[in-house]
Image: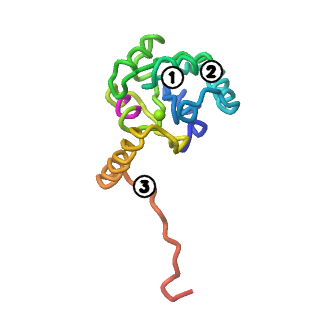
Amino acid sequence: MRSIYEIDLEDLWRRGKRLILTDLDNTLVPWNHPQVPEKLADWLKMAHAKGFHVCIVSNNGEARVDAFARASGLPAVAGARKPKSTGFRMALERFQLPPEAAVMVGDQLFTDIQGANRLGMYSILVLPLDPKEWWGTKAVRMMERVALMMLRSRGLKRPHVVRVGRSEDGR
Ligand SMILES: [Mg+2]
């Protein structure tokens, strides 16, 4: 999925999901971006109106995460140490929900997605919002690209592409 805005909330609700756990940096807003864009505020309103809980689970520090939590009104777990399960569990406990009722949304395979999968939680990978980011994250992204290529070669297929070519007789 390209961004959180493409998530089919109705479908998640039908699948029994009630809690949307979300990464912060480069998933909701660009890295260390302090404000809540109007588009995001509208999306959160819509998700809440449908009945979802939305909670930030971020590896970033408390100062950053708490400031954004206040600005957005969202509950948050800071210093979550994804892909470790601690932060995910704290969030689940807060809402008294099992992993099956939650979905994790994030832009990083090795933290957001792997962490969720370890708990058997449904996960959604989105594209990072901003190319400007911490150098460590950049290095990890290169490894993620390699991992994705390996997964593809083991059967995770890209959508089938139908070749539109000339017919045999050249017309
Ligand atoms: Mg992120």
The picture places residue 58, in percent across and down from the top left corner, at: 46, 25
| Mark 1 to mark 3 CA distance (whole Å) | 30 Å
In the displayed structure, would residue 163 be above or below residue 44? below
Q: Secondary structure at mark 2?
A: helix
Q: Which numbered mark, 3 or 2, is in the foreground of this view?
A: 2
Magenta run includes residue 101 = no
Amino acid type at mark 1: Ile
**Residue 18 appears in the figure:** no
Which segment is the magenta one?
Answer: 112-116
Q: Secondary structure at mark 1?
A: strand
Q: Amino acid at mark 3?
A: Arg
Question: Is 74 placed left or right of 91 in the picture?
Answer: right
Q: Which residue is mark 3?
A: 158
- Does label 1 or label 2 sit earlier along the sequence? 1
Residue 56's disc number: 1
Most distant residue in the bottom direction = 169
Residue drawn at the location 38% of the way across and 29% of the way down: 116
User: Residue 125 location in percent, x, y?
Assistant: 46, 39
The correct choice, above or below, for 171 with respect to 115 in the image is: below
Q: 63 and 114: which one is in front?
A: 63
**Horizontal side of residue 83 vs 78, given as left or right:** left
Q: Are marks 1 and 2 in contact (CB under 8 Å)?
A: yes
Would you name the residue on which mark 2 appears?
72
